[in-house]
Amino acid sequence: YDTDGTTELKYVVKETSGKSGYTVVYGDDESATYVQDNGSVTNKEEDTEVTVAKKWLNADGSTTAPAGATVVLSLYKGTTVEAAAASTDAIATITLDGTADDEGEYVSWKARFTGLSKYDTDGTTELKYVVKETSEKSGYTVVYGDDESATYVQDNGSVTNKEEDTEVTVA
């Protein structure tokens, strides 16, 4: 009670120091700034996502995927882009077939990797993610972004399967 002896005091709890890479959630309300009696304080790990578009470029200039085409996109992580690109251990894969589903192809020929840790275990080093196509489509060359020498793409990038020109010799 307050000093007047009749007014009941109310107490709230606020976390004053949190772990880097985590967001404080009070109760079930992510916008709350404190918790009262019998409430909970949760440290929720910050996460991120990576999206990549799959494109097709045929020898005749059209951009339609070949009938029955499927590709596998694999996700790699590291504390630097270079480390992620050098990794041989994919942490996730998504198979694209031109049909949206709930397994990563959120719209036709676009992959979304979700629920990814934003920070390394130290809580301060932001993780880097890269995507590589790990399946091959016969007659096509993989191009990452606009760089024909690149070996990966980062978030919001594109992976294009470019149809190889074929020569026909007429005798």
Image (tube, rainbow, N blue to C red):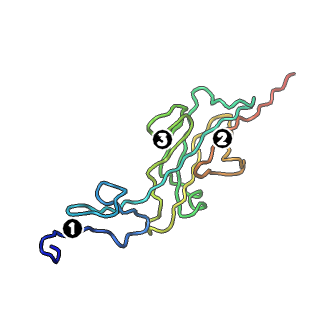
Q: Is residue 107 above or below residue 38?
A: above
* Amino acid type indicated by mark 1: Lys
Q: Quadrant of the C terminus?
A: top right
Extreme residue toward the bottom, this view: 3
Q: Is residue 47 above or below residue 164?
A: below
The secondary structure type at the circle numbered 1 is loop
Give yes or no for contact between labels 2 and 3 (Cβ–Cβ under 8 Å): no
Residue 121 relative to residue 158: left or right: left
Q: Which mark is residue 167?
A: none
Give yes or no for contact between labels 1 and 2 (Cβ–Cβ under 8 Å): no
Q: Position of residue 128 (x, y in %)?
A: 54, 59
Q: Residues within 10 Å of mark 3 (few under 14, many from 20)?
A: some
Residue 30 relative to residue 76: left or right: left
Among numbered discs 2 and 3, the one appearing first in the sequence? 3
**Mark 1 or mark 2, whichever is nearer to me:** 1
Q: Position of residue 68 (x, y in %)?
A: 57, 27
Q: Which residue is mark 1?
A: 10
What is the distance, in whole Å, between disc 1 and disc 2 at their CAs? 61 Å
Residue at position x 20%, y 63% in the image: 37
Q: Which residue is mark 2?
A: 160
Among numbered discs 1 and 3, the one appearing first in the sequence? 1
Residue at position x 15%, y 73% in the image: 1
The secondary structure type at the circle numbered 2 is strand
* Amino acid type indicated by mark 3: Gly
Q: Is residue 171 above or below residue 109?
A: above
The secondary structure type at the circle numbered 3 is loop
Extreme residue toward the right, this view: 171
**Mark 1 or mark 3, whichever is nearer to me:** 1
Extreme residue toward the front, this view: 4
Q: Which residue is mark 3?
A: 104
